Image (spheres, coloured by chain):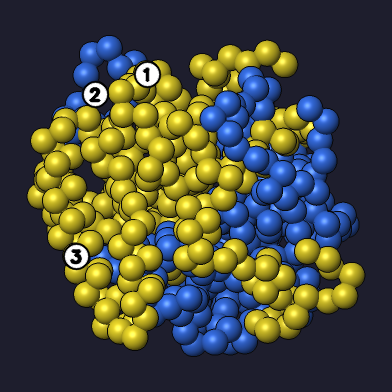
Chain colours: A blue, B yellow
Amino acid sequence: MMSDHNKHDDDYFCSPSYSFSDTEKDGLYKAIFSRRDVRSHFLTDKALPDDIVFRILNAAHHAPSVGFSQPWNFIIIKDKSIRRQVKESFLREYRRSISLLEDYDNKNKQRKEKYMSLKLEGIMESALNICVTYDHTRFGPFVLGRTSIAETGVYSVCCAIQNLWLAARAEGIGVGWVSIVSNEDLHKILAIPAHIRPIAYLCLGYVNEFSDKPDLENAGWLPRLEIGKVICYDQWNNNVPIGFTP
Amino acid sequence: MMSDHNKHDDDYFCSPSYSFSDTEKDGLYKAIFSRRDVRSHFLTDKALPDDIVFRILNAAHHAPSVGFSQPWNFIIIKDKSIRRQVKESFLREYRRSISLLEDYDNKNKQRKEKYMSLKLEGIMESALNICVTYDHTRFGPFVLGRTSIAETGVYSVCCAIQNLWLAARAEGIGVGWVSIVSNEDLHKILAIPAHIRPIAYLCLGYVNEFSDKPDLENAGWLPRLEIGKVICYDQWNNNVPIGFTP
């Protein structure tokens, strides 16, 4: 099938026989397995075309949401002076994180040195930033499915972020999630109303490479867990039965 | 490229030239746009092969996670008596949700009737259920990137859920997220330790169809928002500029 990347969801009509070809499946798994949290590899001088940014945001907008509430907003930030303010917030929070590491882990100098050697954001080097937010008032106050667990609205926004991330990967665009930042600062810098909650601050741009493994795995910060260790049956701590081979 | 779905992430080596073919891109977008929250369309008599369940969980396990903390666990529930207890929790919470709808919306009988006409879960009809949980102690207490916003660990688990959902769709498997359930009940029924937080209770199974649109959109519960309404530039409420055509 030839590709038309301006397709909308309506173009992907589903019928009982609507299945994926092997190559289509491969496309999805390739995006999932080769997606990276990018900090170091942004091409600073290459802009992102608006139509591709839209395509990625449209993928995010088609995430599942509790009660179909679609409680997300996307602030696309190109302005350098605004980004510089976010970078300053990062730097303050980063300094604080070092003191937390010292508190938790004060006998392990090597770990602190490793932490301080890592590049943790690409706010200024990326082509643009996107702040993804959560609006709990959207289509409320009664949101179908949100009556037992209020946080499900936030979960919807996170699903949208993962769609965005995978679509970006397929378009050859790197995404880095800056979580070392103050939401209070983001509220001020981006003029976000009090009732809106920032969920993610993302850096997007073309890259010179996608690493073969996550940066933190490559750096020896933490290993990937064996998947068998995070699966159990019927109840917590019931081990995976023989015959189920991860 | 022929498909081998036992590929691991290592098989998807990334290099600067590592890009997606049009058909591979299509595969990702097809999963994103045709994914549905399934409640009504499960084929009750068709089991899910273990190797495909593993493939889907492996996709979840390759989600991004804050500080590479991989803070998720997956409880695969096939036992019918356990599922029946979860169904009872759903029914109690569902009855409570109706009284909430009456409180919020007491003049709108039509809305209540519509709400009560909707099928909201497939706990017993699906092939199996999966409870996805969050462990804030995993690789802690110092989790890189979680020092400013504690909830980022939960966000990681949600990204894993979205990977799971998309992989299931590509495999022809429907997923329904049951959010009308009590986490306190889940703790008891599934013997989940106190420090572990249930994030999602999912129903998985083969389906007789994937609807062309979300059930709640088809039922006229809510419309899909125009994407232009959820995008702004540089700061909140800066409208999308001319030239950016969603």
Q: Chain of mark 1?
A: B
A36 and A12: which is toward the camera:
A12
Where A212 sits versus B96, above or below? above
Amino acid at pointer 1:
Pro
Where B212 sits versus B111, above or below? above
Q: Which residue corresponds to the image point at 54% horizontal and 18% vertical from the top-left?
A: B5
> Which numbered marker is on residue A240?
2
Mark in front: 3 vs 2? 3
A116 and A141: which is toward the camera:
A141
B230 and A78: which is toward the camera:
B230
Q: Tell if the residue under mark 3 belongs to the same chain as the one under mark 2.
A: no
- Quadrant containing the C terminus of chain A in the rendered view: top left
Tag 1 secondary structure: loop
Q: Is residue A194 among the parts visible in the rendering?
A: yes
- Labels 1 and 3: the sequence-earlier one: 1
Amino acid at pointer 2:
Val
Cβ–Cβ under 8 Å for marks 3 and 2: no
Tag 1: Cα neighbours inside 10 Å, few (<14), some, or many (≥20)?
Answer: few
Q: Find disc 1 in the rendering and name its residue.
A: B49
Mark in front: 1 vs 2? 1
Tag 3: Cα neighbours inside 10 Å, few (<14), some, or many (≥20)?
Answer: few
Tag 2 secondary structure: loop
Question: How far separated are the C-alphas under marks 1 and 3?
Answer: 35 Å
The answer to which quarter of the image holds residue B29 is top right
Q: Which residue corresponds to the image point at 81% horizontal and 35% vertical from the top-left?
A: A3
Where B160 sits versus B148, above or below? above
Q: Is residue A38 among the parts visible in the rendering?
A: no
Q: Find disc 3 in the rendering and name its residue.
A: B95
Q: Which residue corresponds to the image point at 65% horizontal and 40% vertical from the top-left?
A: A13
Amino acid at pointer 3:
Arg
Say whether residue B125 is left or right of residue A95.
left
